[in-house]
Amino acid sequence: MSKQQQHWEKTRGLLFITLAIWFVFSIGIFFFGAEMEASSFRPLGYPLSYYMTCQGSLGIFVILIFWFAGRQEKIDEEFGFTEREDD
Amino acid sequence: MFKGKFIDNLPKIYGTYTGGFLVFIILMAIAEQAGMSAKLIGIFFVAFTVLIYALIGWLSRTLQVDAYYVAGRQVPTVFNGMATAADWMSGASFVAMAGGIYFKGYGYMALLVGWTGGYVLVASLLAPYLRKFGCYTVPDFIGTRYGGNAARLSAVLVLTVASFTYVTAQINATGTIASVALDIPFNIAVYVGLLSILMCSLLGGMRAVTWTQVAQYIVLIIAYLLPVFWISNKMGAGVFPHFMLADEVARIAELESQFGLGTVKNSAADLATVPKGLAGITKAHSEVNTTPWKFISLAVCMMAGTASLPHVMMRYFTTPSVKSARRSVGWSLFFIFLLYSSAPMLATLSKLSLMDPNLATGIIGKSIADVQALDWYQNWNQANLMFVSDFNGNGTLELNEFFMGGKAVVLATPEIAGLPYVISGLVAAGGMAAAMSTADGLVLAIANALSHDLYYKIIDPKAETAKRLIVARVLLVIIGFAGATIAALEIQGILGSVIWAFDFAMSGLFFPLVLGVWWKRANAQGAVAGMLLGLASGTAYLIWVRNGGAGFWGVTQLTFGIVGSLVSLVSMIVVSLITKAPDAATQRMVDEVRIPSGKTVLGKQH
């Protein structure tokens, strides 16, 4: 397998992980709105359903993107596909 | 003071600008104490900020193609994040979102999740790859990746439909704010708004829009956060509202049941006396009040729409590298998060300050005559944004007898909570900044697609630079005026049009864009089928449901993008597979897009 194929394989793997986390916090948990509301886990005292819609999921997306960017940069580096600084 | 290159001095320049703006706010506060009228303060805030944007627009004028289309590809990561956040957060986010949460509670917050979650798709599926491609516009990518004018034209069509729907809403919003702040009729104010939008983009294209958007972000985020923190502290609700309002949320639920929310219903005859556009509180504040599918389908549409709206995507064409495009998406979402996570807090504070009888500002349970005598009630009643009526004739204001417009939550809460008028002026300037920055991005996206993809790439490929840029500017003015003319007709509300725009974009562009990078086998015929059939079926479904059609799968007129994009996906795959695979050159091009290093696929000037 060529270097480029390996690089793409890893990139795709990272995409699937990223999208899986994204799916859980943007879609998955909202199947359980009523259960979240009844949950005794109350971050900062807010009902869990309320918290996730106004801070929780949003914050997780921000962190997820930076984490994804860092991982992708590592993959690019590993196969020597990083851009030159003066590019 | 600012030696060296403009780009190296950005933190200093915008730091000075922010400091200057804060000084301006303080000066206005002093002027208010000295007796300056509220009207004059409002005019000063809006006029001063708009003049600054116009000045930045003039300073950024350019005669270069790549500066005009992609700001010379040298916008640093964090600043591009700020510009994108301003580009993204429209009048709807700024003025209407807190109101939507106030009235609809949990069900509405699907928009919050959708409008942020979409950025994960932008970062992982599209932005870095489109940046590597080196295109000027979104149709530029579609046209080159798939080849042929049919694909390019279809992309221009979808882009125009989606962005135009969106831009009329934004020009409407600038008009609304300009008419209130400057005290002029709405149908004139719309053109005042348009003029300020054009001043920012006409001379410098993307370069000017970028630097005004950064300036607009700074104004709008100060204007949104300052009142939230101030009100929260004044009420004693918490120094840092985002982490400390749990008691207030619980208190609202308690008051809701005490005031009989949901048990006391208004008769149709009573409701008929309420002015159009105003609503009472009928949904619980924090309770889960919608079915999972309704919530999820709306969120999905907003997420896929985010990833297909060209005015957002083109912001990531302006970064210096693929790596910075990726990181820039994270910064964009961070800056958006600052405002979006504050909107529910503002809604909570606003509702509690009106409802709680223990607070001086609470009006529910007070005598109707007292409420009608309040200064702020009279002001906002006159502006047609507030209304009370004693339906049951007991002389006391009940929860079901109080009505408010959605915009009032952001615009009126500072006044209700007893903040000085200078804050209301600041909020007006913030709303103006939010609506203008989005309108700028949208008008430019449409005009660039028409001038670059339709005129230069299809009609006259030999056109010289000077002529191309003149065509681009003429189109900008024409589209602006068309948008303003339609906005003046006020066909659809601000929020409704915005949601439609996402559905249109998702129907026609989501899969053709994503598969262009992630599926090598996708070809021109498939892409054209995907774009046209997706757009057509989405539009047909919308028209059907609007005219009383029953719909299916619980898909409403707000989520028709689900139907459109599914048709788009299926037709794109089927048509691609029954026609010839893309040639070797195209396949190599896709390989090239998938790695960050090396030259862009399209040249620096094209």
Image: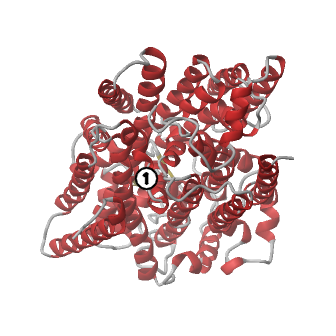
Where's residue B129, x and y in %? 63, 45
Residue highlighted by disc 1 = B74
Up the image or down, B340 lies above or below B315; here it is: below
Label 1: state its secondary structure. Answer: loop
Q: How many marks?
A: 1
Q: Which color scheme did the rendering employ for the protein?
A: secondary structure
Q: Is residue B508 visible?
A: yes
Outermost residue on the right side: it is A1
Q: Nearer the viewer, residue A55 or B62?
A: B62
| Residue under the image location 78 percent in, 77 percent down | A41
The crowding category of the residue bearing disc 1, from other C-alpha atoms within 10 Å (few below 14, some 14 to 19, many at least 20), is some
Up the image or down, B147 lies above or below B86; here it is: above
Where's residue B443, x and y in %? 40, 36
Quarter holding residue B226: bottom left
Q: Is residue B392 visible?
A: no
Three-letter amino acid code at the position of disc 1: Gln
Q: Nearer the viewer, residue B284 or B243?
A: B243
| Residue under the image location 64 percent in, 27 percent down | B542
Where's residue B397, x and y in %? 47, 64
Where's residue B196, x and y in %? 27, 43
Outermost residue on the top side: it is B459
Quarter the N terminus of chain B occupies: bottom left
* Chain letter for the residue marked with disc 1 in the picture: B
Q: Is residue B451 left or right of residue B422?
A: right
Q: Nearer the viewer, residue B499 or B601?
A: B601
Q: Is residue B37 left or right of residue B249?
A: left
Quarter holding residue B377: bottom left
Q: Is residue B153 left or right of residue B169?
A: right
